Image: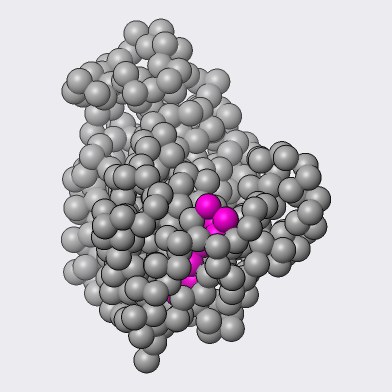
Amino acid sequence: MGKKILMIGSTNTKGDQLRFLKEKIESRGHKGILMDISMGGDPALQPDITPEEIARLGGKDIEELIASKDRFRVTNVMTAGAQQKALELLSQGDLDGIVSLGGSTIALVGSQVMSKLPFGIPKVIGVPAAQTVYIGKWFSATDVIVMQLIMEIAGMNDLVKNAIAQVAGAISGMVEEAYDYTSLKLPYPSVAITELGFSDQCAKYVEQLLTEKGYHVYPFHAQGISDRAMDRLISQGFFDGVIEIVPAGLIEEKFKGNRPAGMQRLDAAGERGIPQVWAPCCLNLTGAGPTRTNREKYLASGRVLEIDEMRSMTRFPVDEMIIGAKLYAEKINKAKGPIKLVVPMRGWSSIDREGSILYDPAEDQIFIEELKKNLRAPLEIEEVDGNLEDFDTARALVDSLVRLMEGKKG
Protein backbone atom coordinates (compact mmCIF):
# COMPACT_ATOMS: atom_id res chain seq x y z
CA MET A 1 0.00 0.00 0.00
CA GLY A 2 1.20 3.50 -0.81
CA LYS A 3 2.11 5.86 1.99
CA LYS A 4 1.10 9.49 2.43
CA ILE A 5 4.05 11.88 2.57
CA LEU A 6 3.67 15.53 3.54
CA MET A 7 5.97 17.78 1.49
CA ILE A 8 6.81 21.27 2.77
CA GLY A 9 8.18 23.90 0.40
CA SER A 10 7.67 27.20 -1.39
CA THR A 11 6.13 26.81 -4.84
CA ASN A 12 6.88 30.36 -6.00
CA THR A 13 10.65 29.83 -5.70
CA LYS A 14 11.07 26.04 -5.88
CA GLY A 15 8.03 24.96 -7.89
CA ASP A 16 9.89 22.92 -10.49
CA GLN A 17 11.98 21.21 -7.86
CA LEU A 18 8.96 20.37 -5.70
CA ARG A 19 7.12 19.01 -8.73
CA PHE A 20 10.08 16.72 -9.47
CA LEU A 21 10.21 15.61 -5.82
CA LYS A 22 6.51 14.79 -5.90
CA GLU A 23 6.84 12.88 -9.17
CA LYS A 24 9.72 10.78 -7.78
CA ILE A 25 7.78 10.01 -4.59
CA GLU A 26 4.66 9.05 -6.53
CA SER A 27 6.69 6.91 -8.94
CA ARG A 28 7.32 4.71 -5.88
CA GLY A 29 3.58 4.27 -5.40
CA HIS A 30 3.19 6.83 -2.61
CA LYS A 31 1.13 10.00 -2.41
CA GLY A 32 2.89 13.34 -2.10
CA ILE A 33 0.84 15.99 -0.27
CA LEU A 34 2.35 19.38 -1.06
CA MET A 35 2.06 22.08 1.59
CA ASP A 36 2.95 25.49 0.17
CA ILE A 37 4.23 28.15 2.58
CA SER A 38 5.00 30.74 -0.13
CA MET A 39 4.64 34.42 0.65
CA GLY A 40 3.57 36.05 -2.60
CA GLY A 41 4.42 35.43 -6.23
CA ASP A 42 2.83 33.09 -8.72
CA PRO A 43 3.07 29.40 -7.80
CA ALA A 44 4.71 27.19 -10.41
CA LEU A 45 2.31 24.37 -9.50
CA GLN A 46 -0.92 24.01 -7.57
CA PRO A 47 -0.31 22.79 -4.00
CA ASP A 48 -2.56 20.42 -2.10
CA ILE A 49 -2.45 22.75 0.91
CA THR A 50 -2.34 26.46 0.09
CA PRO A 51 -0.55 29.29 1.92
CA GLU A 52 -3.97 30.84 2.54
CA GLU A 53 -5.06 27.78 4.53
CA ILE A 54 -1.81 27.67 6.50
CA ALA A 55 -2.01 31.38 7.37
CA ARG A 56 -5.63 30.96 8.45
CA LEU A 57 -4.71 28.06 10.70
CA GLY A 58 -1.97 30.29 12.15
CA GLY A 59 -4.62 32.86 13.00
CA LYS A 60 -3.91 35.43 10.27
CA ASP A 61 -5.07 36.48 6.83
CA ILE A 62 -2.52 35.80 4.07
CA GLU A 63 -2.89 39.25 2.51
CA GLU A 64 -2.29 40.88 5.86
CA LEU A 65 0.85 38.82 6.36
CA ILE A 66 2.23 39.63 2.92
CA ALA A 67 1.54 43.34 3.41
CA SER A 68 3.28 43.41 6.80
CA LYS A 69 6.69 42.51 5.32
CA ASP A 70 7.65 41.35 8.83
CA ARG A 71 9.55 38.19 8.01
CA PHE A 72 9.90 37.06 11.62
CA ARG A 73 6.15 37.37 12.22
CA VAL A 74 5.33 35.70 8.91
CA THR A 75 7.59 32.73 9.68
CA ASN A 76 6.07 32.27 13.14
CA VAL A 77 2.49 32.38 11.82
CA MET A 78 3.18 29.99 8.96
CA THR A 79 5.05 27.64 11.29
CA ALA A 80 2.12 27.55 13.71
CA GLY A 81 -0.33 26.92 10.87
CA ALA A 82 1.86 24.23 9.33
CA GLN A 83 2.19 22.47 12.69
CA GLN A 84 -1.58 22.48 13.16
CA LYS A 85 -2.19 21.14 9.65
CA ALA A 86 0.37 18.36 10.06
CA LEU A 87 -1.22 17.25 13.34
CA GLU A 88 -4.63 17.35 11.67
CA LEU A 89 -3.40 15.09 8.87
CA LEU A 90 -1.82 12.76 11.41
CA SER A 91 -5.04 12.47 13.40
CA GLN A 92 -6.90 11.60 10.18
CA GLY A 93 -4.41 8.90 9.24
CA ASP A 94 -3.15 10.95 6.28
CA LEU A 95 0.50 11.37 7.29
CA ASP A 96 3.03 8.52 7.18
CA GLY A 97 6.15 10.63 6.59
CA ILE A 98 7.26 14.23 6.11
CA VAL A 99 9.92 15.93 3.98
CA SER A 100 10.91 19.57 3.47
CA LEU A 101 12.87 20.87 0.49
CA GLY A 102 14.29 24.38 0.22
CA GLY A 103 16.63 26.86 1.90
CA SER A 104 17.24 27.67 5.54
CA THR A 105 13.78 29.14 6.19
CA ILE A 106 12.04 26.07 4.78
CA ALA A 107 14.36 23.85 6.81
CA LEU A 108 13.49 25.82 9.97
CA VAL A 109 9.74 25.64 9.39
CA GLY A 110 10.00 21.97 8.40
CA SER A 111 12.00 21.10 11.51
CA GLN A 112 9.51 22.88 13.76
CA VAL A 113 6.64 20.96 12.18
CA MET A 114 8.56 17.70 12.52
CA SER A 115 9.25 18.42 16.19
CA LYS A 116 5.50 18.16 16.87
CA LEU A 117 5.19 14.71 15.33
CA PRO A 118 5.68 11.49 17.31
CA PHE A 119 8.85 9.46 17.42
CA GLY A 120 8.96 6.87 14.63
CA ILE A 121 7.38 8.91 11.85
CA PRO A 122 10.02 9.32 9.09
CA LYS A 123 11.30 12.90 8.81
CA VAL A 124 13.73 14.27 6.18
CA ILE A 125 15.04 17.80 5.60
CA GLY A 126 16.63 18.46 2.19
CA VAL A 127 18.66 21.69 2.28
CA PRO A 128 21.53 23.10 0.18
CA ALA A 129 23.83 23.87 3.10
CA ALA A 130 23.43 22.45 6.59
CA GLN A 131 25.16 25.35 8.34
CA THR A 132 26.50 24.59 11.80
CA VAL A 133 24.80 27.63 13.30
CA TYR A 134 21.38 26.29 12.27
CA ILE A 135 21.66 22.54 12.40
CA GLY A 136 21.29 22.21 16.17
CA LYS A 137 17.97 24.05 15.93
CA TRP A 138 16.80 21.78 13.12
CA PHE A 139 17.71 18.60 14.93
CA SER A 140 16.64 19.66 18.42
CA ALA A 141 15.58 16.37 20.05
CA THR A 142 13.75 15.03 17.00
CA ASP A 143 14.43 11.81 15.07
CA VAL A 144 15.11 13.67 11.82
CA ILE A 145 17.53 13.23 8.91
CA VAL A 146 19.16 16.35 7.46
CA MET A 147 20.34 15.69 3.90
CA GLN A 148 22.85 18.26 2.67
CA LEU A 149 22.45 18.79 -1.08
CA ILE A 150 25.66 20.86 -1.50
CA MET A 151 24.52 22.93 -4.50
CA GLU A 152 21.82 25.60 -4.56
CA ILE A 153 18.45 24.18 -5.58
CA ALA A 154 18.10 26.31 -8.69
CA GLY A 155 17.21 25.19 -12.19
CA MET A 156 16.70 21.55 -13.10
CA ASN A 157 20.10 20.33 -14.23
CA ASP A 158 21.27 16.77 -13.67
CA LEU A 159 23.05 17.61 -10.40
CA VAL A 160 19.89 19.09 -8.90
CA LYS A 161 17.73 16.25 -10.20
CA ASN A 162 20.11 13.69 -8.74
CA ALA A 163 20.02 15.38 -5.34
CA ILE A 164 16.23 15.67 -5.27
CA ALA A 165 15.84 12.08 -6.44
CA GLN A 166 17.92 10.99 -3.45
CA VAL A 167 15.74 13.04 -1.10
CA ALA A 168 12.69 11.31 -2.60
CA GLY A 169 14.40 7.94 -2.25
CA ALA A 170 15.30 8.65 1.37
CA ILE A 171 11.79 9.55 2.53
CA SER A 172 10.18 6.85 0.36
CA GLY A 173 12.48 4.16 1.67
CA MET A 174 11.92 5.28 5.24
CA VAL A 175 8.11 5.19 5.04
CA GLU A 176 8.29 1.78 3.37
CA GLU A 177 10.35 0.33 6.20
CA ALA A 178 8.94 2.23 9.17
CA TYR A 179 6.74 0.49 11.71
CA ASP A 180 3.37 2.00 12.46
CA TYR A 181 4.34 4.52 15.14
CA THR A 182 1.22 3.66 17.14
CA SER A 183 2.40 0.05 17.40
CA LEU A 184 5.82 0.91 18.86
CA LYS A 185 5.90 -0.49 22.37
CA LEU A 186 8.49 -1.47 24.95
CA PRO A 187 8.35 -4.58 27.14
CA TYR A 188 7.30 -4.14 30.76
CA PRO A 189 9.04 -3.05 32.91
CA SER A 190 11.17 -0.62 30.88
CA VAL A 191 13.38 1.96 32.55
CA ALA A 192 15.17 4.96 31.06
CA ILE A 193 18.41 6.17 32.65
CA THR A 194 20.54 9.24 32.02
CA GLU A 195 24.33 9.13 32.12
CA LEU A 196 27.53 10.76 30.87
CA GLY A 197 31.24 10.13 31.08
CA PHE A 198 31.53 11.37 34.67
CA SER A 199 28.95 8.81 35.82
CA ASP A 200 30.03 5.94 33.60
CA GLN A 201 30.66 3.37 36.34
CA CYS A 202 27.45 4.21 38.17
CA ALA A 203 25.46 3.77 34.96
CA LYS A 204 27.08 0.39 34.31
CA TYR A 205 26.23 -0.81 37.81
CA VAL A 206 22.65 0.47 37.51
CA GLU A 207 22.13 -1.24 34.17
CA GLN A 208 23.59 -4.49 35.48
CA LEU A 209 21.46 -4.51 38.61
CA LEU A 210 18.25 -3.60 36.79
CA THR A 211 18.85 -6.26 34.14
CA GLU A 212 19.42 -8.89 36.83
CA LYS A 213 16.03 -7.96 38.29
CA GLY A 214 14.28 -8.43 34.93
CA TYR A 215 14.05 -4.79 33.90
CA HIS A 216 14.67 -3.56 30.37
CA VAL A 217 17.12 -0.62 30.41
CA TYR A 218 17.42 2.22 27.90
CA PRO A 219 20.34 4.60 28.54
CA PHE A 220 20.41 8.22 27.29
CA HIS A 221 23.47 10.44 27.21
CA ALA A 222 22.78 13.64 29.18
CA GLN A 223 24.49 16.04 26.79
CA GLY A 224 21.39 18.18 26.26
CA ILE A 225 19.95 16.41 23.22
CA SER A 226 19.59 12.75 24.14
CA ASP A 227 18.09 13.57 27.54
CA ARG A 228 15.57 15.90 25.86
CA ALA A 229 14.76 13.10 23.42
CA MET A 230 14.21 10.79 26.39
CA ASP A 231 11.70 13.27 27.82
CA ARG A 232 9.87 13.36 24.49
CA LEU A 233 9.63 9.58 24.45
CA ILE A 234 8.37 9.57 28.03
CA SER A 235 5.67 12.08 27.07
CA GLN A 236 4.61 9.74 24.23
CA GLY A 237 4.04 6.90 26.67
CA PHE A 238 7.36 5.07 26.57
CA PHE A 239 9.06 3.79 29.78
CA ASP A 240 7.59 2.77 33.10
CA GLY A 241 10.18 4.44 35.31
CA VAL A 242 13.32 6.53 35.13
CA ILE A 243 16.61 6.82 37.00
CA GLU A 244 18.00 10.30 36.51
CA ILE A 245 21.66 9.77 37.30
CA VAL A 246 22.37 13.06 35.51
CA PRO A 247 19.43 15.51 35.71
CA ALA A 248 21.82 18.44 35.15
CA GLY A 249 20.39 19.62 31.80
CA LEU A 250 18.04 21.97 33.65
CA ILE A 251 20.68 23.89 35.60
CA GLU A 252 22.89 23.88 32.50
CA GLU A 253 20.06 25.52 30.57
CA LYS A 254 19.57 28.14 33.27
CA PHE A 255 23.22 29.19 33.31
CA LYS A 256 24.09 28.68 29.63
CA GLY A 257 26.29 25.63 30.06
CA ASN A 258 27.45 23.27 27.33
CA ARG A 259 24.77 20.63 27.99
CA PRO A 260 21.52 22.65 28.13
CA ALA A 261 18.39 20.54 27.84
CA GLY A 262 15.70 23.21 28.02
CA MET A 263 13.61 24.55 30.88
CA GLN A 264 11.06 21.75 30.23
CA ARG A 265 13.62 19.14 31.26
CA LEU A 266 12.14 16.61 33.76
CA ASP A 267 8.54 17.71 33.11
CA ALA A 268 7.51 14.66 31.09
CA ALA A 269 8.05 12.02 33.77
CA GLY A 270 6.46 14.24 36.37
CA GLU A 271 3.44 14.90 34.20
CA ARG A 272 2.93 11.20 33.46
CA GLY A 273 3.45 10.29 37.09
CA ILE A 274 5.91 7.46 36.48
CA PRO A 275 8.31 6.61 39.36
CA GLN A 276 11.53 8.59 39.36
CA VAL A 277 14.77 8.24 41.31
CA TRP A 278 17.31 11.04 40.99
CA ALA A 279 21.02 11.21 41.71
CA PRO A 280 22.67 14.67 41.73
CA CYS A 281 25.42 14.04 39.17
CA CYS A 282 26.82 17.36 37.88
CA LEU A 283 24.26 19.53 39.63
CA ASN A 284 27.34 21.05 41.28
CA LEU A 285 29.69 21.08 38.26
CA THR A 286 29.73 22.85 34.92
CA GLY A 287 32.01 23.25 31.93
CA ALA A 288 34.58 26.05 31.66
CA GLY A 289 36.30 25.04 28.44
CA PRO A 290 36.87 27.11 25.28
CA THR A 291 33.46 26.22 23.82
CA ARG A 292 31.61 27.99 26.65
CA THR A 293 30.63 31.53 25.76
CA ASN A 294 30.63 32.90 29.33
CA ARG A 295 33.56 30.88 30.62
CA GLU A 296 35.52 33.72 32.27
CA LYS A 297 32.99 33.89 35.08
CA TYR A 298 33.58 30.23 35.87
CA LEU A 299 37.34 30.29 35.47
CA ALA A 300 37.54 33.06 38.07
CA SER A 301 37.01 30.62 40.94
CA GLY A 302 40.42 29.05 40.31
CA ARG A 303 38.96 25.59 40.98
CA VAL A 304 39.24 24.23 37.44
CA LEU A 305 39.91 20.65 36.42
CA GLU A 306 41.21 20.30 32.86
CA ILE A 307 39.85 17.20 31.15
CA ASP A 308 41.30 17.66 27.64
CA GLU A 309 41.88 20.43 25.07
CA MET A 310 38.15 21.12 24.72
CA ARG A 311 36.87 20.41 28.22
CA SER A 312 37.53 21.91 31.61
CA MET A 313 35.21 21.52 34.59
CA THR A 314 34.60 23.76 37.57
CA ARG A 315 32.00 24.13 40.31
CA PHE A 316 28.85 26.18 39.98
CA PRO A 317 29.09 29.24 42.26
CA VAL A 318 27.05 28.85 45.44
CA ASP A 319 24.53 31.51 44.38
CA GLU A 320 23.82 29.57 41.17
CA MET A 321 23.52 26.27 43.05
CA ILE A 322 20.88 27.91 45.28
CA ILE A 323 18.93 29.11 42.25
CA GLY A 324 19.31 25.68 40.70
CA ALA A 325 18.01 23.97 43.83
CA LYS A 326 14.84 26.07 43.62
CA LEU A 327 14.35 25.04 39.98
CA TYR A 328 14.62 21.35 40.85
CA ALA A 329 12.26 21.79 43.79
CA GLU A 330 9.68 23.26 41.38
CA LYS A 331 9.93 20.15 39.20
CA ILE A 332 9.45 17.88 42.22
CA ASN A 333 6.50 19.95 43.43
CA LYS A 334 4.74 19.57 40.07
CA ALA A 335 5.32 15.83 39.70
CA LYS A 336 2.22 13.64 39.80
CA GLY A 337 4.12 10.49 40.73
CA PRO A 338 6.64 9.30 43.32
CA ILE A 339 10.19 10.72 43.39
CA LYS A 340 13.14 9.82 45.56
CA LEU A 341 16.60 11.40 45.74
CA VAL A 342 19.75 9.36 46.41
CA VAL A 343 22.66 11.58 47.51
CA PRO A 344 26.24 10.29 47.70
CA MET A 345 28.07 12.20 50.45
CA ARG A 346 31.57 11.97 48.96
CA GLY A 347 31.19 13.58 45.57
CA TRP A 348 28.53 13.61 42.88
CA SER A 349 30.67 12.36 39.97
CA SER A 350 33.94 10.63 39.11
CA ILE A 351 35.75 13.99 38.98
CA ASP A 352 34.75 15.44 42.37
CA ARG A 353 35.87 12.55 44.50
CA GLU A 354 37.69 13.16 47.78
CA GLY A 355 41.08 14.65 46.94
CA SER A 356 39.90 16.38 43.74
CA ILE A 357 40.11 20.16 43.43
CA LEU A 358 36.35 20.01 42.79
CA TYR A 359 35.51 18.09 45.98
CA ASP A 360 33.40 20.20 48.34
CA PRO A 361 30.72 18.29 50.27
CA ALA A 362 29.84 21.39 52.32
CA GLU A 363 28.80 23.29 49.19
CA ASP A 364 26.97 20.22 47.92
CA GLN A 365 24.96 20.20 51.14
CA ILE A 366 23.91 23.82 50.55
CA PHE A 367 22.15 22.64 47.38
CA ILE A 368 20.34 19.85 49.23
CA GLU A 369 19.23 22.12 52.08
CA GLU A 370 17.93 24.75 49.66
CA LEU A 371 16.07 22.05 47.76
CA LYS A 372 14.38 20.87 50.98
CA LYS A 373 13.38 24.43 51.92
CA ASN A 374 11.48 24.88 48.65
CA LEU A 375 9.54 21.60 48.66
CA ARG A 376 5.80 21.70 49.34
CA ALA A 377 5.82 18.14 50.66
CA PRO A 378 8.53 15.99 52.26
CA LEU A 379 10.84 14.19 49.83
CA GLU A 380 12.52 10.90 50.65
CA ILE A 381 16.27 11.51 50.49
CA GLU A 382 18.66 8.62 51.03
CA GLU A 383 22.26 9.50 51.85
CA VAL A 384 25.00 7.11 50.78
CA ASP A 385 28.40 7.21 52.46
CA GLY A 386 30.39 7.14 49.26
CA ASN A 387 30.90 8.65 45.82
CA LEU A 388 28.39 8.57 42.96
CA GLU A 389 30.55 6.03 41.13
CA ASP A 390 30.58 3.56 44.03
CA PHE A 391 28.51 0.38 43.82
CA ASP A 392 26.50 1.28 46.92
CA THR A 393 25.12 4.37 45.18
CA ALA A 394 23.98 2.37 42.17
CA ARG A 395 22.40 -0.24 44.43
CA ALA A 396 20.52 2.45 46.34
CA LEU A 397 19.23 3.94 43.07
CA VAL A 398 18.04 0.58 41.76
CA ASP A 399 16.51 -0.64 45.02
CA SER A 400 14.68 2.67 45.37
CA LEU A 401 13.20 2.54 41.88
CA VAL A 402 12.14 -1.10 42.26
CA ARG A 403 10.34 -0.25 45.49
CA LEU A 404 8.60 2.78 43.94
CA MET A 405 7.54 0.80 40.86
CA GLU A 406 6.23 -2.13 42.91
CA GLY A 407 4.33 0.31 45.10
CA LYS A 408 2.79 2.07 42.11
CA LYS A 409 1.89 -1.23 40.46
CA GLY A 410 0.23 -2.40 43.67
User: Residue 366: horizontal and vertical position, in percent?
Assistant: 50, 27
- Could you say which is closer to the camera, residue 268 or residue 410? 268
**Residue pictured at 46% horizontal, 47% vertical:** 103
Could one spot residue 349 in this view of the protein? yes
Depth check, front residue: 311 or 74: 74
Q: How many marks?
A: 0
Q: Identify which residue is drawn at 58% across, 39% down.
A: 327
Side of 154 relative to 89 (left or right): left
* 121 or 95, nearer to the observer: 95
Q: Where is residue 223 in the image (x, y as percent from the top left)?
A: 35, 42
- In the depicted view, which residue is nearer to us: 23 or 337? 23
Give yes or no for residue 219 being in the magenta stretch. no
As displayed, is residue 360 above or below residue 144? above
Quarter of the N terminus within the rendering: bottom left
Q: Is residue 25 above or below residue 1?
A: above
Residue farthest along the bottom direction in this orientation:
1
Residue at left offset 39%, top offset 74%: 23
Quadrant hosting residue 160: bottom left
Residue 370 is situated, as x and y percent measured from the top left of the image, at 57, 32
Q: In this view, does 58 lie to the left or right of 243?
A: right
> Is 9 inside the magenta-drawn segment?
yes
The region drawn magenta spans: 5-13
Q: At which x and y percent is residue 137?
A: 46, 44
Q: In this view, does 408 lie to the left or right of 209?
A: right
The residue depicted at 44 percent of the width and 57 percent of the height is 101
Query: Residue 188: in sight, yes or no?
Result: no
